[in-house]
Protein backbone atom coordinates (compact mmCIF):
# COMPACT_ATOMS: atom_id res chain seq x y z
CA UNK A 1 0.00 0.00 0.00
CA UNK A 2 1.26 3.49 -0.81
CA UNK A 3 0.25 6.74 0.91
CA UNK A 4 1.50 10.31 1.23
CA UNK A 5 2.64 12.00 4.43
CA UNK A 6 2.55 15.80 4.44
CA UNK A 7 4.51 17.33 7.32
CA UNK A 8 7.65 15.48 8.39
CA UNK A 9 8.38 17.05 11.76
CA UNK A 10 9.11 15.07 14.92
CA UNK A 11 5.84 13.15 14.75
CA UNK A 12 5.37 12.97 10.98
CA UNK A 13 8.96 11.96 10.33
CA UNK A 14 8.91 9.16 12.88
CA UNK A 15 5.57 7.96 11.57
CA UNK A 16 7.13 7.65 8.13
CA UNK A 17 9.95 5.60 9.64
CA UNK A 18 7.52 3.25 11.37
CA UNK A 19 5.34 2.91 8.28
CA UNK A 20 8.33 2.06 6.12
CA UNK A 21 9.54 -0.52 8.60
CA UNK A 22 6.02 -1.96 8.54
CA UNK A 23 6.14 -2.40 4.79
CA UNK A 24 4.01 0.60 3.76
CA UNK A 25 5.29 2.69 0.84
CA UNK A 26 5.30 6.39 1.73
CA UNK A 27 5.59 9.45 -0.45
CA UNK A 28 6.70 12.34 1.75
CA UNK A 29 6.71 16.10 1.53
CA UNK A 30 7.87 18.81 3.91
CA UNK A 31 8.78 22.46 3.45
CA UNK A 32 12.30 21.53 4.59
CA UNK A 33 13.89 19.70 1.62
CA UNK A 34 16.74 18.42 3.78
CA UNK A 35 14.25 16.49 5.92
CA UNK A 36 12.69 14.95 2.82
CA UNK A 37 16.13 13.96 1.52
CA UNK A 38 17.14 12.40 4.85
CA UNK A 39 14.04 10.21 5.10
CA UNK A 40 14.39 9.18 1.47
CA UNK A 41 18.02 8.22 2.07
CA UNK A 42 17.57 6.48 5.41
CA UNK A 43 14.12 4.87 5.08
CA UNK A 44 13.48 4.54 1.37
CA UNK A 45 10.66 7.09 1.44
CA UNK A 46 9.69 8.38 -1.99
CA UNK A 47 10.69 12.04 -2.00
CA UNK A 48 8.44 14.70 -3.47
CA UNK A 49 9.06 18.34 -4.26
CA UNK A 50 5.53 19.58 -3.52
CA UNK A 51 2.16 18.42 -2.28
CA UNK A 52 0.96 18.17 -5.87
CA UNK A 53 3.99 16.05 -6.74
CA UNK A 54 3.28 13.76 -3.77
CA UNK A 55 -0.35 13.26 -4.84
CA UNK A 56 0.69 12.57 -8.43
CA UNK A 57 2.85 9.67 -7.21
CA UNK A 58 -0.11 7.88 -5.60
CA UNK A 59 -2.57 5.42 -7.11
CA UNK A 60 -6.30 5.22 -6.32
CA UNK A 61 -7.66 5.27 -3.76
CA UNK A 62 -5.14 7.93 -2.83
CA UNK A 63 -4.48 8.44 0.88
CA UNK A 64 -2.94 11.71 2.08
CA UNK A 65 -2.07 11.92 5.79
CA UNK A 66 -1.52 15.39 7.23
CA UNK A 67 0.73 15.99 10.26
CA UNK A 68 0.47 19.77 10.44
CA UNK A 69 -0.24 22.36 13.13
CA UNK A 70 -3.92 22.69 13.95
CA UNK A 71 -5.97 25.61 12.75
CA UNK A 72 -5.18 27.55 9.61
CA UNK A 73 -2.21 25.46 8.35
CA UNK A 74 -4.37 22.33 8.31
CA UNK A 75 -7.38 24.20 6.94
CA UNK A 76 -5.40 25.64 4.05
CA UNK A 77 -3.83 22.32 3.18
CA UNK A 78 -7.14 20.45 3.20
CA UNK A 79 -8.66 22.99 0.83
CA UNK A 80 -5.59 22.96 -1.43
CA UNK A 81 -5.77 19.17 -1.68
CA UNK A 82 -9.33 18.95 -2.96
CA UNK A 83 -8.59 20.02 -6.57
CA UNK A 84 -5.79 17.43 -6.66
CA UNK A 85 -7.94 14.51 -5.49
CA UNK A 86 -10.80 12.45 -6.93
CA UNK A 87 -13.90 10.76 -5.57
CA UNK A 88 -12.97 7.89 -3.27
CA UNK A 89 -9.65 9.39 -2.18
CA UNK A 90 -9.01 9.94 1.53
CA UNK A 91 -7.54 12.74 3.63
CA UNK A 92 -6.40 11.94 7.17
CA UNK A 93 -5.76 14.67 9.73
CA UNK A 94 -3.41 13.23 12.34
CA UNK A 95 -2.70 16.53 14.08
CA UNK A 96 -4.35 18.00 17.16
CA UNK A 97 -7.28 19.67 15.45
CA UNK A 98 -10.42 20.81 17.23
CA UNK A 99 -13.07 18.15 16.71
CA UNK A 100 -15.59 20.80 15.57
CA UNK A 101 -13.20 21.65 12.72
CA UNK A 102 -12.90 17.96 11.87
CA UNK A 103 -16.68 17.56 11.73
CA UNK A 104 -16.97 20.59 9.45
CA UNK A 105 -14.14 19.44 7.19
CA UNK A 106 -15.50 15.93 7.02
CA UNK A 107 -18.94 17.14 5.97
CA UNK A 108 -17.49 19.44 3.31
CA UNK A 109 -15.18 16.75 1.92
CA UNK A 110 -18.09 14.29 1.79
CA UNK A 111 -19.87 16.71 -0.53
CA UNK A 112 -16.82 16.49 -2.81
CA UNK A 113 -16.88 12.69 -2.65
CA UNK A 114 -13.63 12.60 -0.68
CA UNK A 115 -13.29 10.50 2.45
CA UNK A 116 -11.97 11.97 5.68
CA UNK A 117 -10.53 10.48 8.84
CA UNK A 118 -9.59 12.39 11.99
CA UNK A 119 -6.88 10.59 13.92
CA UNK A 120 -6.10 11.47 17.50
CA UNK A 121 -2.44 10.46 17.67
CA UNK A 122 -0.67 9.76 20.95
CA UNK A 123 2.80 8.40 21.61
CA UNK A 124 5.02 11.43 21.17
CA UNK A 125 8.68 10.92 20.35
CA UNK A 126 8.44 7.32 21.61
CA UNK A 127 5.94 6.32 18.95
CA UNK A 128 8.63 5.14 16.54
CA UNK A 129 9.87 2.55 19.02
CA UNK A 130 6.66 1.70 20.89
CA UNK A 131 4.00 2.37 18.27
CA UNK A 132 1.32 5.05 18.28
CA UNK A 133 -2.03 5.03 20.04
CA UNK A 134 -4.51 5.99 17.33
CA UNK A 135 -8.08 7.10 18.03
CA UNK A 136 -9.76 7.50 14.66
CA UNK A 137 -13.08 8.85 13.47
CA UNK A 138 -14.68 8.26 10.08
CA UNK A 139 -17.02 6.07 8.12
CA UNK A 140 -16.73 2.28 8.25
CA UNK A 141 -15.64 2.30 4.60
CA UNK A 142 -12.78 4.73 5.22
CA UNK A 143 -11.73 2.86 8.35
CA UNK A 144 -11.56 -0.40 6.38
CA UNK A 145 -9.33 1.17 3.73
CA UNK A 146 -7.06 2.68 6.38
CA UNK A 147 -6.74 -0.48 8.52
CA UNK A 148 -3.37 -1.68 7.12
CA UNK A 149 -1.84 1.76 7.72
CA UNK A 150 -3.25 2.02 11.23
CA UNK A 151 -1.98 -1.46 12.06
CA UNK A 152 1.51 -0.55 10.88
CA UNK A 153 1.57 2.57 13.05
CA UNK A 154 0.07 0.97 16.17
CA UNK A 155 1.99 -1.11 18.76
CA UNK A 156 0.47 -4.24 17.19
CA UNK A 157 -2.08 -5.09 14.55
CA UNK A 158 -4.70 -5.99 17.15
CA UNK A 159 -4.19 -3.26 19.74
CA UNK A 160 -3.31 0.39 20.21
CA UNK A 161 -5.70 1.63 17.54
CA UNK A 162 -9.47 1.83 17.28
CA UNK A 163 -12.17 3.21 15.04
CA UNK A 164 -13.99 5.01 17.85
CA UNK A 165 -16.86 6.61 15.95
CA UNK A 166 -17.89 8.95 13.12
CA UNK A 167 -15.88 11.90 11.85
CA UNK A 168 -14.87 14.10 14.78
CA UNK A 169 -14.88 11.26 17.31
CA UNK A 170 -11.15 10.64 16.92
CA UNK A 171 -10.09 14.18 17.74
CA UNK A 172 -12.75 14.42 20.46
CA UNK A 173 -11.36 11.30 22.15
CA UNK A 174 -7.81 12.65 21.89
CA UNK A 175 -8.95 15.98 23.36
CA UNK A 176 -10.33 14.28 26.46
CA UNK A 177 -7.20 12.08 26.60
CA UNK A 178 -5.05 15.21 26.79
CA UNK A 179 -7.28 16.75 29.44
CA UNK A 180 -6.78 13.65 31.59
CA UNK A 181 -3.06 13.85 30.87
CA UNK A 182 -2.98 17.41 32.25
CA UNK A 183 -4.57 16.21 35.50
CA UNK A 184 -2.20 13.28 35.91
CA UNK A 185 0.85 15.44 35.31
CA UNK A 186 -0.32 18.07 37.76
CA UNK A 187 -0.99 15.43 40.41
CA UNK A 188 2.48 13.92 40.11
CA UNK A 189 4.08 17.37 40.16
CA UNK A 190 2.26 18.42 43.34
CA UNK A 191 2.89 15.16 45.15
CA UNK A 192 6.59 15.10 44.33
CA UNK A 193 6.96 18.72 45.39
CA UNK A 194 5.44 17.82 48.77
CA UNK A 195 7.89 14.95 49.14
CA UNK A 196 10.81 17.21 48.29
CA UNK A 197 9.57 19.86 50.72
CA UNK A 198 9.75 17.49 53.72
CA UNK A 199 13.40 18.30 54.29
CA UNK A 200 13.70 16.51 57.65
CA UNK A 201 13.28 13.18 55.84
CA UNK A 202 15.75 13.99 53.02
CA UNK A 203 13.66 11.90 50.65
CA UNK A 204 15.25 10.63 47.44
CA UNK A 205 12.71 11.32 44.70
CA UNK A 206 14.52 9.11 42.21
CA UNK A 207 14.32 6.20 44.64
CA UNK A 208 10.66 6.81 45.44
CA UNK A 209 9.47 7.20 41.85
CA UNK A 210 11.39 4.04 40.90
CA UNK A 211 9.75 2.28 43.85
CA UNK A 212 6.28 3.37 42.76
CA UNK A 213 6.85 1.95 39.28
CA UNK A 214 6.56 -1.58 40.68
CA UNK A 215 3.11 -2.83 41.78
CA UNK A 216 1.88 0.52 43.11
CA UNK A 217 -1.56 1.83 42.19
CA UNK A 218 -0.07 4.95 40.54
CA UNK A 219 2.34 3.11 38.23
CA UNK A 220 2.12 4.38 34.64
CA UNK A 221 4.21 5.29 31.63
CA UNK A 222 4.13 8.90 32.82
CA UNK A 223 5.68 7.77 36.10
CA UNK A 224 8.27 5.73 34.17
CA UNK A 225 9.37 8.84 32.29
CA UNK A 226 9.43 10.90 35.49
CA UNK A 227 11.51 8.31 37.35
CA UNK A 228 14.01 8.14 34.50
CA UNK A 229 14.40 11.93 34.44
CA UNK A 230 14.82 12.22 38.22
CA UNK A 231 17.45 9.49 38.15
CA UNK A 232 19.71 11.93 36.32
CA UNK A 233 18.66 15.25 37.88
CA UNK A 234 16.49 15.93 40.93
CA UNK A 235 17.24 19.65 41.27
CA UNK A 236 15.99 20.63 37.78
CA UNK A 237 17.87 23.91 38.17
CA UNK A 238 18.20 24.29 34.40
CA UNK A 239 14.47 23.79 33.75
CA UNK A 240 12.42 26.98 33.63
CA UNK A 241 9.15 26.86 35.66
CA UNK A 242 7.12 27.55 32.52
CA UNK A 243 4.61 24.99 31.23
CA UNK A 244 2.92 25.63 27.87
CA UNK A 245 -0.59 24.37 27.21
CA UNK A 246 -1.85 22.89 23.97
CA UNK A 247 -5.24 23.83 22.60
CA UNK A 248 -6.69 20.51 23.67
CA UNK A 249 -6.50 21.26 27.39
CA UNK A 250 -8.49 24.44 26.84
CA UNK A 251 -10.98 22.69 24.58
CA UNK A 252 -11.54 20.02 27.23
CA UNK A 253 -12.38 22.66 29.84
CA UNK A 254 -14.79 24.35 27.42
CA UNK A 255 -16.42 21.01 26.66
CA UNK A 256 -16.97 20.39 30.37
CA UNK A 257 -18.73 23.76 30.63
CA UNK A 258 -20.81 23.07 27.52
CA UNK A 259 -21.96 19.72 28.93
CA UNK A 260 -22.41 21.03 32.45
CA UNK A 261 -20.07 18.31 33.71
CA UNK A 262 -17.94 19.07 36.76
CA UNK A 263 -14.28 18.58 35.80
CA UNK A 264 -12.39 20.48 38.54
CA UNK A 265 -9.16 18.48 38.30
CA UNK A 266 -8.80 18.84 34.54
CA UNK A 267 -9.76 22.50 34.62
CA UNK A 268 -7.51 23.41 37.54
CA UNK A 269 -4.57 21.60 35.93
CA UNK A 270 -5.04 23.89 32.92
CA UNK A 271 -5.27 26.95 35.17
CA UNK A 272 -2.00 25.97 36.88
CA UNK A 273 -0.30 26.01 33.49
CA UNK A 274 -1.65 29.51 32.92
CA UNK A 275 -0.12 30.50 36.25
CA UNK A 276 3.31 29.26 35.17
CA UNK A 277 3.03 31.32 31.98
CA UNK A 278 2.26 34.60 33.77
CA UNK A 279 5.62 36.33 33.53
CA UNK A 280 4.41 39.54 35.16
CA UNK A 281 2.75 37.84 38.11
CA UNK A 282 0.49 40.89 38.34
CA UNK A 283 -2.38 39.05 40.03
CA UNK A 284 -0.08 37.84 42.80
CA UNK A 285 1.28 41.37 43.22
CA UNK A 286 -2.29 42.56 43.73
CA UNK A 287 -2.90 39.86 46.34
CA UNK A 288 0.20 40.93 48.26
CA UNK A 289 -0.90 44.57 48.11
CA UNK A 290 -4.37 43.68 49.43
CA UNK A 291 -2.92 41.72 52.38
CA UNK A 292 -0.77 44.71 53.25
CA UNK A 293 -3.70 47.11 52.93
CA UNK A 294 -6.09 45.32 55.28
CA UNK A 295 -3.69 43.53 57.62
CA UNK A 296 -0.41 45.36 57.46
CA UNK A 297 1.30 42.19 56.26
CA UNK A 298 4.83 42.67 54.97
CA UNK A 299 5.25 42.96 51.21
CA UNK A 300 8.23 41.17 49.73
CA UNK A 301 9.99 43.43 47.25
CA UNK A 302 10.94 42.22 43.79
CA UNK A 303 14.60 42.18 44.75
CA UNK A 304 13.91 39.92 47.73
CA UNK A 305 13.66 42.68 50.40
CA UNK A 306 10.64 43.24 52.68
Image: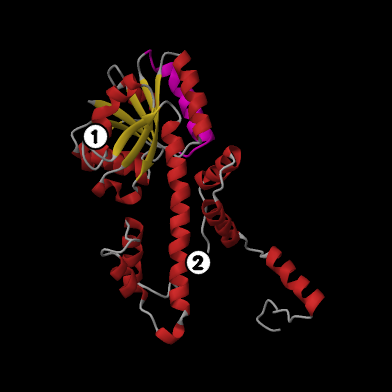
Q: Is residue 186 visible?
A: yes
Whole-percent x, y for residue 14 in the image? 30, 44
Dot 1, crowdedness within 10 Å: few (<14), some or many (≥20)?
many
Whole-percent x, y for residue 168 in the image? 46, 30
Q: CA distance from mark 1 to mark 2?
A: 38 Å
Whole-percent x, y for residue 229 in the image? 34, 66
For residue 31, above or below residue 109:
below
Q: Looking at this rendering, what residue extends furthest in the bottom direction?
A: 200
**Which of 6/262 is in front?**
262
Q: How is the image coloured?
A: secondary structure
Q: Is residue 232 visible?
A: no
For residue 89, above or below residue 130:
above
Among the 4 quarters of the image, the one containing residue 54: top left
Whole-percent x, y for residue 203 in the image? 38, 80
Among the 4 quarters of the image, the one containing residue 134: top left
* Residue on which the image places disc 2: 240
Q: Is residue 274 left or right of residue 236?
A: right
Point out the stretch of residues depicted in magenta.
69-87
For residue 232, above or below residue 67:
below
* Residue on which the image places disc 1: 151
Q: Are marks 1 and 2 in contact (CB under 8 Å)?
A: no
Amino acid sequence: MRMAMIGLGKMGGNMVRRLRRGGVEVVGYDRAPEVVAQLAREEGMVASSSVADAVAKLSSPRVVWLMLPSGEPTEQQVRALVPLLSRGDIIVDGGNSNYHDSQRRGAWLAEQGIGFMDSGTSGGIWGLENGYCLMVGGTAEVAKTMTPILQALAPAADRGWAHVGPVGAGHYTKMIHNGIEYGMMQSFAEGLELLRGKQEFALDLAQITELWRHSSVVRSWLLDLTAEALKHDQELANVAPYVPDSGEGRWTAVEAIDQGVAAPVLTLALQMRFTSQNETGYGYRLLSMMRNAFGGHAVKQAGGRK
